Each structure stands twice: as structure tokens, then as C-alpha cells.
Amino acid sequence: MSQDVPPVNELDLSAYWMPFTANRQFKANPRIFVSAEGMHFATADGRKVLDGTAGLWCVNAGHGRREIAQAVERQLLTLDYSPAFQMGHPGAFELAARIARMAPEGLDRVFFGNSGSEAVDTALKVALAYHRARGEGQRTRFIGRERGYHGVGFGGMSVGGIANNRRTFGPMLPAVDHLRHTHGLPGNAFAKGQPPHGAELADDLERLIALHGADTIAAVIVEPLAGSTGVLIPPHGYLERLRAICDRHGLLLIFDEVITGFGRLGAPFAAQHFGVTPDLITVAKGITNGVVPMGAAIVKRGIHDALMQGPEHVIEFFHGYTYSGHPVACAAGLAALEIYARESLFERAASLAPALQEAVHSLRGAPHVADIRNLGLVAAVELEPRSGEPGKRGYDVFLDCYEHGVLVRQTGDILAISPPLTVEESQIHQIVETIANAVRRVV
Ligand code: PXG
């Protein structure tokens, strides 16, 4: 740690208002990481904690990657910042080109921001601008989905469907509706991979189109696999059906791949894993291995080209951030993509998926386990809530795992597992055994 920071036991914890954290509880009993290497964090009290969550679904190549650190240092000493508007630097063009090569056929224009939330706002704005450029400016409505998470900007929050993230913050975007989520259908519990039932829930979109009129709707946004809400895996045929309905009615389909992008399902993007091609993809997190903030909207060329109109000296799309395509983020991104390719980490994720599936489903029958689901290198264990205390059992199990050296992610009574793609099979077993012991210890 830098010499400017006092030892952990002398830190004043009061000024830092922590995001998505129970601040008072945390500060009474803080959990502080001081370093990370490979698959492990180290805590202030000198314990090693196995990273079962790739940080927050972002550190796909594991921690402490020298190549990324060196690329960042080189970049800082060469060109630390370059104005994002009306000026360029090589790294942004190169990173965009490489992302375009990895993306599904046809999606080869990349707009950079700094987070998933900004990527989502960018994608929504591209959708509005595109329809307007084509003379369909009345298409201003968005369709999201219940339990969807698209970040915390007003756009992403509006199309998102997690009640706690919405209820405090007023009316939001005026013209948004939501599909039902696909979770909890009879016959789907304990499904391995994609659950069998529920493709017909995509027909909700037809219902909303009938209600609002297709010509008022700009785009549909979904996570192909919903992560943050507790790992909801799309039923067989569901995404294909959404795609077909969007095509029938001229709606753009946005896949929010902030979690699934960069290998989580064993392919560069979930779109490729599922064989369903959206019109836009939003990414963040793994784009830089999580080490420098960055997000992006990847856009079909035809959508981009529709906006390249008007006098050539006039800005075509009035949108962007001071740090769009930041040189340091681009350097980190290029180094991260290099590692993903050199170490074949996406293929590694695919080859480890069966081991994760087998390990996690061994928890079936353990105390309070209500459902288990998995796809690629992501899995979830859903616990029965304690009566009158939703989320408390999940939190207690999360804490027990942490105290026994494994970091999992807890959302209510759901535990999510999404390790770096560098995870060893033995570490998958350690994660699952730690959860098994925790659910037995925690009543
Ligand atoms: N879309 C999706 C699908 C996400 O998962 C965002 C957008 C927003 O990204 P930013 O970079 O603005 O946070 C996300 C973020 C979790 C968890 O484990 C998930 C996210 C962030 C923090 C925690 O629940 N996803």
C-alpha cells in the first residue's frame, strides 16, 4: 500500500460513503482487502481469500497481471491523457478494431465510455438517434425486463427491473415497459445449463407491442444471462424468439453483456454462445480485466452508418465522455485482450464449465438449497429465505464463506459464483465445499 495511507487499523472509515453496501454494518465490522494476486485477495489481517466472483464479475484473467500493469505504466509515461473530442490517439482505434473483430458479424462500431451504466445509456441514445435519423423519431419507448440490471444511470435504472434500485428515485424515463422475467417456472428448478421451459415468455413482447404500438418502440434491452439479480439463465429458445419478434416489428435488440462479455460463457460474447445476434451489445468490466474503468457500446455498422449524415464538419452524434477511450483504459484493454487470446481463456471457461456444473449441483439436497443453476463459468445457489428475514440467510452464508476463505457474491438469498477464467478445478471444488459447509453451519 502507498505510504500516503495509514495502516488499516488507523483508517477513518467515516468519510467514504460506500456503494451498494450496508454502510453502518460494514463500518462496525469492516472487510478490507489490501492486495490481490492470481486467484486470491489478501485481507488486512493477513488471510488469503479465494476470489469466487472475479472481483465483481470483471477480473476474468485473474489478479495482478504484470502485462496489464506494465502496459498501463508505459501508457501513463507516453500519453497520459488525450482529449476525447475532436482528437484521437492510437490505442482507442486499435482497441475498437480488436473488439470489432471479436464481436458477432456485423457489430463492428465501438463507442467507449467508462462503465456499464454509461455503456447502457450510450446504447439507448444510439437507438433513439438511429430511429430519428431514419424518420421514425416517434420510436422513443424502451422495453426492459423485470429483474434486469442495466446500471444506475437514469436510463439503465428505468429499463432495469430491480425494485430496490428504482423505488427511491422518482418517475425516471417516461416511456418504458417491462417484460416478465423468466425465473421460477415449474420444471426449471435445478436445470443444468439452459432451463427447458419458458421460451413463450418472449411473447410478452408481442403483448407490449400490441399495447403501445410497434411504431412507438425504439429498442428492447435484456441481459442474455441476467447476472446481478441472481443468475437467471434464458430458457431454451427464449432469446431466439425475442430476436424474431424484434425483427418482425423493426425494434432494435440490445444485449447487455456487461457480465457475459469477454468469455464468461466460453465465447467472447453471450450472443455467440447462444447463436443470437443483437443490434447492439453493451460491455464493461472484463474489457480491461476490471483494472481500469471502461465500458463500450458495440453497434451494428448499419446503425452507425445511418447516423453519418449531414455536413461533414458537424458532429454526427452529440454524445461522449471526457474519458471516452481514455488512453490508460485502452492500454489496459489491449493488454487484457492479449492475455485472453494468448492463454485461450474463453476456451478454458468452456472446458471448465462441466466441472463447475457437476460441483455446484452436488449441493442439491444440502440444507435450505432451493435451486441451483449454471451456464459457462457462472453458477448460482438459491437458498430458501428465513421466514420474515428475506436475504438474511444469504448474507450469513456469504459471511461464513468469507470467514472461511472464499468470496462469493450474495444477492438476497442467492449466492453467485463467477470466478476468474483462470480458476483451477481444485479451486472450483474449494468454492463449492465452502458453500456446502456454510449452509450446514448457518441455520
Ligand atoms: N449492466 C449489467 C448487466 C451489469 O451487470 C451494469 C450494467 C452496470 O455497470 P457499472 O460499471 O456501471 O457498474 C452491470 C453491473 C453484482 C454486481 O454482483 C453487478 C454489477 C455491478 C456491481 C455488482 O450484483 N453489474
Image (cartoon, rainbow, N blue to C red):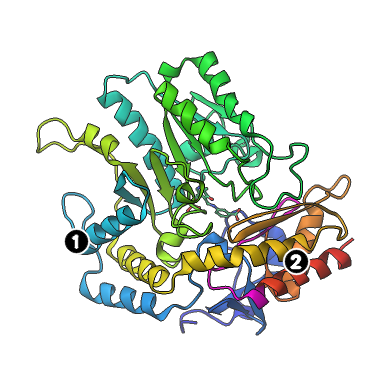
Residue for badge 2: 399
**Element under label 2?**
helix
Image quadrant where one finds the C terminus: bottom right
Residue for badge 1: 89
Q: Nearer the viewer, residue 6 or 432?
A: 432
Q: Give the residue drawn at x 33%, y 42%.
A: 299
Q: Position of residue 367 (x, y in %)?
A: 88, 59
Q: Give the residue drawn at x 31%, y 75%.
A: 71
Q: Is residue 138 above or below residue 329?
A: above
Residue 258 sits inside the magenta stretch: no
Residue 65, label in figure: none
Q: Where is residue 169, by image quadrant?
A: top right
Marks 2 & 1, CB-CB < 8 Å contact = no
Amino acid, disc 1: His
Q: Nearer the viewer, residue 320 or 280?
A: 280
How far, Cα to Cα, is label 2 from label 1?
45 Å
Q: Which residues are magenta?
A: 410-427
Query: How many neighbours does mark 1 have within 10 angstroms: few (below 14), some (14-19), or many (20 or more)?
Result: some
User: Along the polypeptide, which appears first: circle 2 or circle 1?
Assistant: 1
Q: Where is residue 31, by image quadrant?
A: bottom right
Q: Is residue 49 above or below residue 217?
A: below
Q: Position of residue 239 (x, y in %)?
A: 53, 37
Q: Nearer the viewer, residue 380 or 20?
A: 380
Q: Position of residue 166 (x, y in %)?
A: 60, 37
**Element under label 1?**
loop
Q: Position of residue 401 (x, y in %)?
A: 75, 69
Residue 422 sits inside the magenta stretch: yes
**247 on left or right of 313:** right
